Image (cartoon, rainbow, N blue to C red):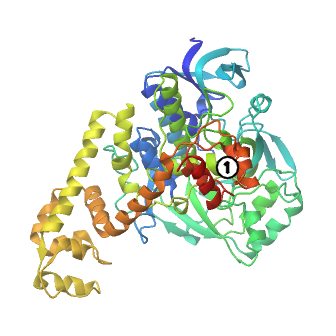
């Protein structure tokens, strides 16, 4: 048993797994300490990866050499590209996953990663000397020394589970909470808070009547998350949709007096965008029904996840109400839904590398930072693992900007604005979302991963070939002319104006309702051109041609705004001496300690006039 490591990762959830893999793949000796080796990367909530904006994050993780996309593909039971009816900036891949297979594949991937060691135990203390974190102490009294420590404790820090009037300690159902670390961190000067999340009942799928529900099959041509050559799904399991009704709501309301949320026993704030069913009934009282997604938990299990019915009401109330849902008349419950409260730490206490400002060599990633979701956690874990390795090797930190990745938006939002409720990523949070599409994550990020040593030459060559092929398609469309006789019939069918003279194909592809594959059918030269390329390359080329003007405009805006990111702010500025700053600006700038003027401009409460004062002070 080794006692010294380069990087120690505490917690075997999605953030911890990506963190330890990244550090090890870059050359660090890394130790993953988890309370239960059998639940590594367990999907504690819904058995799915991706979704709106989250799917982009999974693709970014894959482009950076992380494992989440590969594991999701290997354990997928359904694939869907969401928001196809909207613009490509909104397209978001999502997989329904086999919960047990997902965890199994993650553990296997980590065991196959050179440089990763494991230890099953609870970390109860940190070894901090002269302001540096140099290791951890476990519950059974073992000390492990290291050059850096990454905390990814999820919902386990003083976790408290609520079901009606019952409450008991736990990090999730069937798992004990992690105790001791919160007190240690508070004693070191960190500010903590409480957050809440919840989960719905799990149901026996054999007891459901699916004929009363709406079937939701996967895509006819399912894709993958990973940019590697992954096998496509040949068979898929369907999800289903049902709805609550007034009778369901009436029964649920009978348990409100025993609800831990309404009775005030839960102090933490829950996720705004994933409320409990009782919260939805109160907040949206005008609605007669709420949508429910019936999601299978895997290939071989009959267990069903009742998405949309998260609750902490007494189990008998949950059961009675659930049987009034169409298709659930004879439903059998495997386990009730519950709410869980846990400790988190304000992420404004972190640097943009996810290293804490108070203790060198100590990093936070995942729900400990106030986020919600597997994908947000995994993205943070990867970045923490990368930066921990870089720091101990005296290399330049790796920080993604807001115009480079959703992961960059996520981390910048957290460290700059903080959060008072579980943070969830949306496309609307990214001001450059047409640049941050799911189809181009490899083009954006794999070259950076290659420089870090996280992507090998094979992946780099693959990206270079993709870029070359996309450019070739675009050039062929720029060179090829279309004449009225060959294209007008197709245009009229698409309710598009006919052309009156010869025009370049690239000008026609920019029209609404005009599809690159259809257009290639009416012109032999274009047909020969795209026949040589993959569906992904053709799709990316079409997006770049159709949205060329928007993309250029967004790049120009990004370049202008990012100039502020190049103006560094000294660490030792005493903001209280800048008399022209507002009192709120002095307080928030002192607390956040932004690294650049750009970051300062995004802090809530900082006005343009405050930035002007700062710019003058900086000599600009």
Quadrant for the N terminus, please.
Answer: top right
Above/below status of 542 relative to 38: below
Can residue 274 be seen?
yes
Q: Residue at left 74%, top 54%?
A: 584
Q: Nearer the viewer, residue 580 or 231?
A: 580
Report which quarter residue 546 is drawn in: bottom left
Count residues near mark 1 (Cα–Cα under 10 Å), then give few for <14, some for 14-19, many for 20+.
Answer: many
Q: Position of residue 381 (x, y in %)?
A: 55, 37
The quarter holding residue 242 reads: bottom right
Query: Taking 510 as reference, is 593 left or right?
Result: right
* Residue at horizontal 58 percent and vertical 71 percent from the top: 212
Is residue 605 shown left or right of residue 442? right
| Nearest the eye: 557 or 45 | 557
Whether 337 is drawn above or below 246: the answer is above
Q: Position of residue 213 (x, y in %)?
A: 57, 70
Q: Is residue 444 left or right of residue 492?
A: right
The residue that disc 1 covers is: 418
Closer to the camera, 323 or 430? 430
Judge left or right: residue 563 versus residue 354: left
Q: Residue 454 placed where, x, y %?
A: 39, 33
Exactly how many numbered labels are in the figure?
1
Report helix, strand or loop for mark 1.
loop
* Rendering coords of residue 177 (x, y %): 75, 35
From this viewpoint, is residue 48 visible? no
Residue 558 drawn above or below residue 156: below
């Amino acid at each position: 048993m080794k006692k010294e490591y380069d990087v120690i990762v505490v917690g075997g959830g999605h953030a911890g797994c990506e963190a330890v893999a990244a550090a090890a793949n870059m050359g660090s000796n890394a130790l993953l300490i988890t309370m239960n080796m059998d639940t590594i990367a367990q999907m504690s909530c819904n058995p799915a990866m991706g979704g709106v904006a989250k799917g982009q994050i999974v693709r970014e993780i894959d482009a950076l050499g992380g494992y989440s996309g590969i594991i999701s593909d290997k354990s997928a039971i359904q694939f869907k590209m969401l928001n196809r009816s909207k613009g490509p900036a909104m397209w978001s891949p999502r997989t329904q996953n086999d919960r047990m297979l997902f965890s199994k594949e993650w553990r296997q991937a980590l065991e196959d990663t050179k440089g990763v060691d494991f230890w099953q135990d609870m970390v109860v203390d940190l070894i901090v000397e002269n302001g540096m974190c140099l290791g951890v102490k476990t519950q059974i009294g073992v000390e492990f020394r290291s050059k850096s420590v990454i905390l990814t404790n999820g919902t386990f820090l003083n976790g408290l589970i609520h079901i009606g009037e019952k409450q008991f300690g736990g990090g999730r159902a069937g798992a004990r909470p992690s105790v001791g670390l919160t007190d240690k961190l508070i004693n070191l000067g960190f500010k903590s808070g409480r957050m809440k999340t919840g989960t719905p009942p799990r149901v026996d799928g054999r007891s459901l009547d699916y004929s009363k529900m709406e079937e939701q099959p996967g895509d006819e041509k399912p894709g993958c998350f990973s940019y590697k050559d992954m096998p496509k799904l040949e068979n898929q399991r369907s999800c289903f949709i049902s709805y609550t009704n007034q009778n369901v709501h009436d029964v649920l309301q009978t348990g409100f007096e025993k609800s831990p949320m309404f009775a005030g026993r839960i102090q933490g704030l829950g996720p705004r965008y994933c409320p409990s069913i009782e919260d939805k009934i109160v907040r949206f009282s005008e609605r007669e029904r709420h949508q429910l997604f019936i999601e299978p938990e895997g290939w071989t299990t009959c267990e069903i996840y009742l998405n949309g019915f998260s609750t902490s009401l007494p189990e008998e109330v949950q059961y009675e109400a659930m049987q009034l849902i169409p298709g659930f008349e004879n439903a059998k419950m495997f386990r009730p839904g519950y709410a869980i409260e846990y400790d988190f730490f304000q992420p404004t206490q972190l640097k943009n590398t996810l290293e804490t400002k108070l203790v060198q060599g100590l990093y936070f990633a995942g729900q400990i930072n106030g986020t919600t979701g597997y994908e947000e956690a995994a993205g943070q874990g990867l970045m923490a693992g990368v930066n921990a390795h870089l720091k101990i090797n005296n290399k330049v930190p790796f920080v993604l900007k807001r115009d480079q990745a959703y992961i960059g938006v996520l981390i910048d939002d957290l460290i700059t604005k903080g959060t008072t409720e579980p943070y969830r990523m949306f496309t609307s949070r990214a001001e450059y979302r047409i640049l941050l599409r799911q189809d181009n994550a490899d083009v954006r990020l794999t070259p950076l991963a290659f420089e870090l040593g996280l992507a090998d030459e094979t992946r780099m060559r693959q990206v270079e070939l993709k870029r070359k092929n996309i450019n070739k398609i675009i050039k062929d469309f720029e060179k090829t002319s279309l004449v009225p006789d060959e294209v007008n019939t197709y245009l009229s069918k698409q309710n598009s104006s006919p052309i009156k003279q010869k025009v370049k194909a690239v000008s026609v592809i920019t029209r609404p309702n005009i599809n690159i594959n259809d257009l290639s059918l009416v012109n032999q030269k274009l047909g020969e051109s795209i026949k040589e390329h993959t569906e992904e390359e053709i799709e990316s080329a079409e997006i770049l041609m159709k949205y060329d003007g928007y993309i250029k405009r967004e790049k120009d805006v990004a370049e202008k705004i990012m100039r502020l990111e190049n103006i560094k702010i000294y660490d030792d500025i005493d903001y209280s001496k800048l008399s022209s700053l507002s009192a709120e600006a002095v307080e928030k700038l002192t607390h956040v300690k932004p690294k650049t003027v750009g970051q300062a401009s995004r802090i809530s409460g900082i006005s343009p006039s405050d930035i002007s004062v700062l710019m003058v002070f900086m000599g600009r």
